[in-house]
Amino acid sequence: MKKHYLPLALEQRYQIWALLNSGKNRSEIALELGVHRSTISRELKRNQGDNGYEPKQAEKRSQHRRRSARKAGKRTAELEQQVVDGLRRGWSPGSISDRLKLEKDDKNQQVSHTTIYHWIASNKASGGCWHHYLPNQGR
């Protein structure tokens, strides 16, 4: 079963700060907080400022990222049709994605090449034929 990510609380950030200042390494801090060591590494990488790690500043940075995170776009029939039309023309998913970025101001009407590949794989798994339109026919 997939584990869900829970953001660190301000109290945990203060614990990280105190343990860093006492000379503990990332693995020891993770063990003390009961989280994976990659959580600590990620926290320090994302939220460390010019003056080192500061809990209040780390909390502000984290909240800002959560507020400004792009929401997942909707897979509309219109967008899907534009992708299929591009595939039928022999365009690569990258070309389709680039074209949509140029033509569409609405970010919900844009899609990354990776998402297009996911759509193609999903279509193929359900017996579809989109993969045949790829330049190398999905090989």
Image: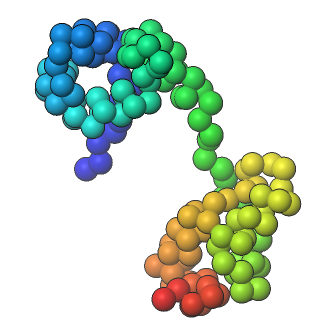
Residue 129 visible, this angle: no
Residue at image location 57% in from the left, 90% down from the top: 136
Decide if residue 139 is on the left or right side of residue 31: right
Residue at image location 63% in from the left, 60% down from the top: 112
Q: Is residue 119 above or below residue 23?
A: below
Decide if residue 10 is on the left or right side of residue 128: left
Q: Residue furthest front?
A: 50
Residue at image location 73% in from the left, 50% down from the top: 108
Residue 13 visible, this angle: yes
At which x and y percent is residue 43?
A: 36, 28
Q: Quadrant of residue 35?
A: top left
At which x and y percent is residue 48?
A: 42, 22
Decide if residue 130 is on the left or right side of residue 7: right
Residue at image location 30% in from the left, 12% down from the top: 17
Question: Foreground residue, 54 or 106?
Answer: 54
At which x and y percent is residue 67?
A: 59, 26
